[in-house]
Image (spheres, rainbow, N blue to C red):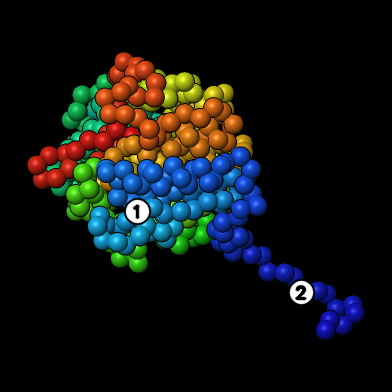
Amino acid sequence: MRVIGEPAAQARPTSPAAANLHLAKVTPAARRDIDYAALDARLQRMAAKPNMVGLAVGIVENGRITFLSGYGETVAGSGEKVTPETVFRWASVSKGVASTMVAKLAEQGRVKLDAPVVNYAPGLKLPGGAEYQATVRDLLSHRLGLYRNALDNKLEEGQQPALLRLQLASLNAICQPGTCWSYQNIAYDASSDIVARAANMPFSDAVKQQLFDPIGMTSASMSREGLITARSWARPHSAGRRPLEVLEPYYRVPAAGGVNSNIKDMALWMIAQAGGMPRVLSPSLLQTIHAPVVKTPGERGRLRKFLERVGDAYYGLGWRQYDYAGHPIIGHRGGVSGYRSLMLFDPQRKSGVVALWNSSTSQPGGLEFEVMDMLYHLPFRDWMELDKVPGQPAVTPQAPEEPEATEAIAAEGSAGGGVRAGR
């Protein structure tokens, strides 16, 4: 009992992680626009497709998780069910983690986004000494002047990223830095060096300390070991349901494709990116990484099935931006051998979808647009092509393939050669 006149004890400030605990719970009361029964029925049909093994999906509405579900198996024929706790690989959705971490350090005054990249990642060498001209912002927006996926084949053969970043200097440039867009993995991972130097600790430790732990992402990791030691983890498979080995190369470029987590933690990451955790990711930081930097017309070619809805496409810092039926949305997709991932959200509504699956098929990719159609009350389209009859045209007429319409995102091949997957 406090004596009158005695000063009250000051309340201890809660940590961001403690403050965000309530966001990790599924909150049906936040449901507004998504038809969850219809969505669940379609996801069950998707999981039963012959090229699928396991699938995990999360929905966020109004800044709260409203749906988490697993479908299928962690290993084909095993009977071990995928649950919301099953860990998968994010592949290139990891790029948004790296850009967020660099922007966090910029907010702390440790990095300048418009300074030459050589100031912070001296191990990155570009044709003609362009590392003195290219900025950190150019690095994070894939505007270094290199051809697409430069030297990824060497990474897949087992060569070390640090040596490959030196070898980039021997390539022919396709443009001056900052003047064209071309997707990268090895060069992009120079951002992990930037973080390690500026934070004075390994990239994975900095991300855990400043992002994953405050957000409450308890399953997240950035190593092969982190994946295969999880209590429940999804094994990779080919599109023919053949089990594959978990390969190491793209864990060696963690900023480009190294994150693992369960679907719950991926949904929490999306909530933070949509502005739901301002103590961890400030509005100004989100504006920095989400702002469109460069137009990517080739992306519309890759999304040609969805052109009825998809307008202009851009790339920011580790994130894609789209006009979808007049709504600005943000996201990314990823793929490594045997795994695929997606994230797409409306930052104004703080609503969106995340999905992870453990086979090399791209068919579930239409899920993100089916969810957006529900969110905006648009007419139904079979974007996942569950009702498509073999031999019939796709849901919309095919547009001609554009240059740069495919980007190889962290796709790992067997010893016989690299396998490319467009994301």
Q: Quadrant of the C terminus?
A: top left
Quick check: 238 left or right of 264?
A: left
Work out whether residue 356 or residue 134 is closer to the camera in this orientation and state it: 356
Q: Residue at label 1? A: 72
* Circle 1 or circle 2, nearest the eye: 1
The amino acid type of the residue labelled 2 equals Ala
Closer to the N terminus: mark 1 or mark 2? 2
Quick check: 31 left or right of 220?
A: right
SS of the residue under disc 1: strand
Q: Residues within 10 Å of mark 2 (few under 14, many from 20)?
A: few
Q: Badges 1 and 2: C-beta atoms under 8 Å apart?
A: no
Instruction: Examine the rendered structure and indicate whether residue 277 appears above or below residue 164.
Output: below
Q: Residue at label 2? A: 9
On the image, the x and y values in percent for residue 314 come to 45, 26
The amino acid type of the residue labelled 1 equals Gly
On the image, the x and y values in percent for residue 166 come to 21, 39
Q: Residues within 10 Å of mark 1 (few under 14, many from 20)?
A: many
On the image, the x and y values in percent for residue 137 come to 43, 33
Work out whether residue 55 or residue 282 is closer to the camera in this orientation and state it: 55
Quick check: 417 left or right of 173?
A: left
Q: Residue at x 41, y 47 (%)?
A: 44
Task: Tell me where residue 393 sits by quadrant.
Answer: top left
